[in-house]
Amino acid sequence: EYEADGCDCVQVDNVHGAYEATKHLADLGHKRIALVNGPLRFVPSQQREEGFLKALKEAGLSFDPGLRLEVPNYRREEGFDAGNQLLQGRPAPTAVFVAAGDVCATGVMLALKKNGLQVPKDMSVVGFDDQPFAELVEPALTTVRQPMARMGSEAFHLLKEALKDPKSHKP
């Protein structure tokens, strides 16, 4: 829990999650790791990019701005377009961290499949959220877990505390 924009909130550690996802890909031996992220005007997107860049730096990998794509609405179709766009670059990445979430990651995976590539044999893909459908796609999506039930519970307790002492909390 922490305060964001003057409000009490409960949120996943986006920097750490993105760092771990990118480190996982680097530890697998990937040297050209792409980032598909949401709009940088949103704090979670900024935080996920921060974690991504930190892991690249620690692994001694350079950041190629041509391997960074932004999707405005986190949709599957946007992930599909991003996947196709990444495949047009030379050399293409060997892995993609889809910080924009699992829905978008399934679009990236579909683009790879439609282009004759297999995940993870030809390209690794990691998402962010751990949506229930992540294990249903073929192959199952590797993803960063957001513990939604725990986050909901923490938010409920924070709300109870705010109701007891409204002056010490901001809605």
Image (spheres, rainbow, N blue to C red):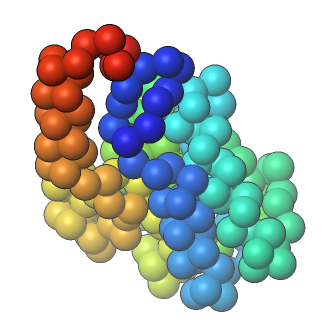
- Of residues 41 and 117, the one nearer the viewer is 41
Residue 71 sits above or below residue 87 on the image: above
84 and 1: which is toward the camera: 1
In terms of image quadrants, where is residue 104? top left
Q: Which residue shows up at 80% across the image and 50% down it? A: 66
In the image, 63 versus 169, the foreground residue is 169
Quadrant of residue 60 in the image?
A: bottom right
Residue lying at 65% horizontally and 59% vertically, measured from the top left = 52
Q: Residue at x 68, y 50 (%)?
A: 50
Residue 26 seen in this snapshot? yes
- In the depicted structure, whether residue 157 falls above or below residue 112: above
| 66 horizontally vs 78: left or right | right
Q: Residue 32: image x %, image y %?
A: 73, 71
54 vs 164, left or right, is right
Q: State whether residue 39 appears in this view.
A: no
Q: Is residue 73 above or below residue 65?
A: above
- The mark tally for this picture is 0
The answer to whether 30 is drawn above or below residue 168 in the figure is: below
Res 130 quadrant in image: bottom left
Q: Give residue 95's position: percent from left, percent from top.
A: 60, 70
Which residue is found at the position 34% from the left and 19% from the top? 169
- Percent position of residue 67, x then y: 74, 54
Image location (x, y in percent) of residue 15: 57, 53
Q: Quadrant of the N terminus?
A: top left
Q: Quadrant of the C terminus?
A: top left
Q: Going by the image, does 131 lie left or right of 36? A: left
